[in-house]
Amino acid sequence: MEELMRRKVLLIGMLLIFYMPSITFGDDIESRLKTLEEALKIQGETIKEQQLIIRQLKNQLETSKQAPDSNSAQTKISGGNSDEQGSDKKEPAEENGWKVSGLFGSSNLSNPNISMVLNTFGYHSNLKSGVLSGRGVPGYTTSGLNNTKGFNLDSAELGFFAPVDPYFNLYATIPVAEDGVELEEAYFVTTFLPYGFQAKGGKFKSGFGRLNGQHKHTWDFADLPLPYRAFIDGEGITEKGLQITWLPPLPFYTLFGVEVLQGENATLFGSDAHEGPHAFTAFAKMSLDIGENSTVLFGPSVITGKTRTDTIAADSVFQGSSTLFDWEMTYKWKPSKIKSLVVQSEYMYRTQHGELTDNATGIAGSLKRGQDGVYAQAVYQLGLWRFGARFDALDLMAKQYSLSGGQADFGSRPWRASAALDFNATEFSRIRLQYNYDKSNGSGKANNEIFLQLIMAIGAHAAHPF
């Protein structure tokens, strides 16, 4: 191509010389004719080269037309039957101008994004291990603390995500712990529904509340607040089901969602509360920008369903219905990459009514509970360091525990205070030191807890909610 350009420049120069009205270098007509002949010769050679390039491009085009269809090859490998049945119908992806090839799709789809997050921590308490395992929250849950003094490996969490085709994305989260492998999440998300609608199906973290949808390694503290432990327990509401969300075209971010869930949360519903899906969720999430550096996120949530659980009282089973309300509020201030402040709070209120049956005597009594809880936390970032403080409490404004018409009293109000210091060498590693002063047991004896947590991540991890 450079040679071709050189010849064009030379040709133009010669033509300019030929048609100049005056000859400044003493050229006569004969020399001008000679110059013109040389220019025409160069122009002929250029045309020949252009014709050769055109023939080569035509040959390449014919070869590509005669090559086997990559989509057909993909169908054969994946077990499709369009070739065997002689179907002329195009695949949906091809109808939209999107083609795939290879075993699972094109090159960017055949290799799902894979990540691993290691969550390990050291733990110490002034209480004995046997006391910790039986230390529940009286009137709320009998589930104790599972932390072992010394070294703990929470999990090495494997994450997978990739687009399936133009219509679906697929996600999976598989924590690998010392006691086995768990399928925490495995769900699809649609990408083709119109008017701001989106569907999610499989096993996933519910959209209820703020912290519920977050994985452990994204928490600002090593453990969940007291309201989550008392009303939900574990890592939150992670259920099999279907979620539908709608993002309407409003001046500010607003997301509405509803869910139909199997209802297997052990504390809130129980694993065998009812045949088929029996838990239902609705939520709304809003976000407003305040100036250039600040954002406020807020919204209500509610989940309700049939309940059959043995976590309320020792050697007893409760059967009835449960409803849990939540109001979330988060303020974020981030003037720069090295400085930020996040203030976050959630208020929860739970109502339950049904029968509590003693397993030993078989005597059943009517149980009605109306209880609430709240947590408030603030995390300030300065450079590579983060400083966090949290306060959480139960029985804030509601303290009803009526068994067979009589009000039960479980002692003083459960509460806890926490402080945390994080060092983030990079965005892929975090070291956290946390202290809890826990008086949630009602016994009057505090649990002084210390966590030294290490979180490390490798691979391409799916984005977290803002």
Image (spheres, grey):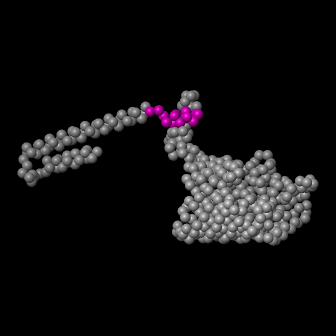
Judge left or right: residue 36 versus residue 149: left
Q: Which residue occupies 50% across, 44% down?
A: 107
Q: Is residue 74 above or below residue 367?
A: above
- Residue 213 is at least partly visible in this image: no
Picture quarter containing residue 293? bottom right
Q: Which residue occupies 78% across, 50% down?
A: 271
Q: Of all residues shown, which one is farthest toward the front?
A: 150
Q: Is residue 417 above or below residue 299?
A: below
Picture quarter containing residue 80? top right
- 398 part of magenta stretch: no
Picture quarter containing residue 455? bottom right
Specify the segment rendered in magenta. Answer: 67-80
- Residue 266 is at least partly visible in this image: yes
Q: Nearer the viewer, residue 253 or 148?
A: 148
- 70 part of magenta stretch: yes
In the rendered image, the quadrant that contains the N terminus is top left
Measured as percent of width and height from the top left, residue 122 is found at: 67, 63
Judge left or right: residue 124 versus residue 334: right
Measured as percent of width and height from the top left, residue 61 is found at: 39, 35
Judge left or right: residue 401 versus residue 248: right
Q: Is residue 82 above or below residue 399?
A: above
Number of on-image labels:
0
In the rendered image, the quadrant that contains the C terminus is bottom right
Q: Which residue occupies 66% across, 51% down?
A: 176
Q: Which residue occupies 57% across, 69% down?
A: 385
Measured as percent of width and height from the top left, residue 224 is found at: 70, 62
Measured as percent of width and height from the top left, residue 26 is found at: 6, 51
